[in-house]
Amino acid sequence: MQKLLDGYRNFREGHWPQVRRVYEQLADRQRPDTLIIACSDSRVDPHTIFDAGPGELFVVRNVANLVPPCEQGEGLHGTSAAIEFAVVKLEVQTILVLGHARCGGCTAALDHTIGADTMFLAPWITLLEPALARVHDHHDPQTALERESIVVSMERLKAFPFIAAAMHTRGLTVQGARFGVADGRLEVYDAATKSFENVT
Ligand SMILES: [Zn+2]
């Protein structure tokens, strides 16, 4: 906690005076134009990667940047609720699924290293199974799964009725990208070629 408080004091003394006016303007309501669904991984912070300031990005983070199927079954649906809020209430223009290299969630799914002894992780990681099935014989299954899981999440997003409606009526777009942790490069999914292309 001490490190966090030291960081807060640095923010308050150093950065806050520069962004104070922005926060004051945002005090009444937020108007982000982008929803990002990213991994909780500590190396993949969307605000850092996209050089974004306060109020610009509405971010949902979970293990392996996964979108669950559009289902209203048992339990609570935190990721789906955040997606609904961003699309229906905030009316974001873009949804970006942001995956990344060296994703531990993907590694665990490939290696089957998350056991039944976990309460929530093992069932959560089963969301990767459709992507896993598509990369079965790939020469680089880690990278292939990281990419395919983004594609599956994009497909699931488009099956949410309020997203399909917003795409049709007001041009909401669903995008995918993958951040290379070690090299800092970003590759973006190209729907026309169905492949990920480096951003230059
Ligand atoms: Zn990850």
Image (cartoon, rainbow, N blue to C red):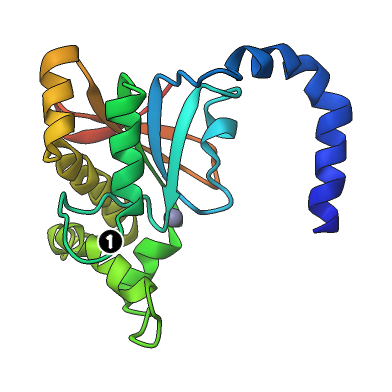
Residue at the far bottom in the pictured view: 117
* Residue 180 seen: yes
**Badge 1 is on which residue?**
141
Residue 142 horizontal side relative to residue 54, left or right: left
Residue 62 horizontal side relative to residue 67, left or right: right
Image quarter in which the C terminus is found: top left
Please count the marks in the image.
1
In-front residue for pair 114/30: 30
- Residue 52 location in percent, x, y? 56, 23
- Residue 181 location in percent, x, y? 52, 46
In-front residue for pair 120/133: 120
- What amino acid type should be assigned to the residue bearing mark 1? Pro
Ligand 1 within 8 Å, label 1 CB: no
The image quadrant that residue 193 belongs to is top left
- Residue 38 location in percent, x, y? 42, 44
* Residue 95 seen: no
**Image quarter for ligand 1:** bottom left
Residue at left offset 37%, top offset 50%: 65
Is 154 located above or below residue 52 in the figure?
below
Residue at left offset 27%, top offset 45%: 150
Q: Residues within 10 Å of mark 1 (few under 14, many from 20)?
A: some
Task: Kindly state the secondary structure of the residue where label 1 is placed.
Answer: helix
- Residue 71 location in percent, x, y? 15, 54
Is 125 located above or below residue 85 in the figure?
below
Is 13 located above or below residue 19 in the figure?
below
Image quarter in which the N terminus is found: bottom right
Residue at left offset 40%, top offset 81%: 118
Is 69 located above or below residue 21 in the figure?
below
The image quadrant that residue 20 belongs to is top right
